Amino acid sequence: MGLRQTAEADLGIILEDDITGFGFPIVITDPAGSSGTGPLIGTPVDIAQLIDPDTGQAVSGRLASCSIRISSLTAAGLDIPKGIADSASKPWTVQFDDVNGNTRLYKVSQSNPDSALGVVVLLLEAYEC
């Protein structure tokens, strides 16, 4: 096994450990309404404080994202999600519970795949159907 394969296998432990790690169930749905064989296990983030790049000061805002293994998406029968700029079209959506059990729904605004490591980081926006 090469270094990249070892790194991708380690990535599975880092992102998908839902027992002692940061992995949480995540449902990803494509614009056609398919969630594949999901839910997937990944690492979601939703924080409400950002750093203003001009001033370096903390400001109120919202930054949501999730990291998913590309191999897990493929195994679930899904493509790599993409941000869809056309507001008249259905977006890729991502759903996960916060730590208190509240279900949150987001749309994918940007997709950043890393094919060398086998991970995609999805930048998310709050979404209502």
Image (tube, grey):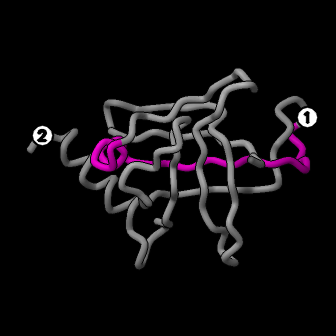
Toward which corner of the image does residue 122 lie, by quadrant?
top right
What residue appears at the point 44 percent right and 71 percent down from the top-left corner? 21
**Rendered location of residue 23, percent (x, y):** 46, 65
In the rendered image, the residue lying farthest to the front is 32
List the residue tagged with mark 2.
Answer: 2
**Rendered location of residue 79, percent (x, y):** 39, 35
Relative to 64, say whether 42 is above or below: below
Which of 3/87 is in front? 87
What residue appears at the point 33 percent right and 43 percent down from the top-left corner? 77
Which of 86/118 is in front? 86
In the rendered image, the residue lying farthest to the top is 86
List the residue tagged with mark 1.
Answer: 55
Left or right, residue 56 beside residue 23: right
**Rendered location of residue 83, percent (x, y):** 61, 29
What residue appears at the point 69 percent right and 22 percent down from the top-left corner? 85
* Label 2 crowd bin: few (<14), some (14–19), many (20+), radius 10 Å: few
**Rendered location of residue 19, percent (x, y):** 41, 78
Alpha carbon distance from label 1 to label 2: 44 Å
Relative to 82, say whether 4 is above or below: below
User: Which quadrant, please, contains the N terminus?
Assistant: top left
The amino acid type, in three-letter code, at marker 2 is Gly
Relative to 20, say whether 12 is above or below: above
Mark nearest the camera among 1 and 2 is 2
Magenta segment range?
56-77
Q: Look at the numbered disc 2 and give the secondary structure of its residue.
A: loop
Asked whether 102 falls inside the magenta stretch, the response is: no
The amino acid type, in three-letter code, at marker 1 is Thr
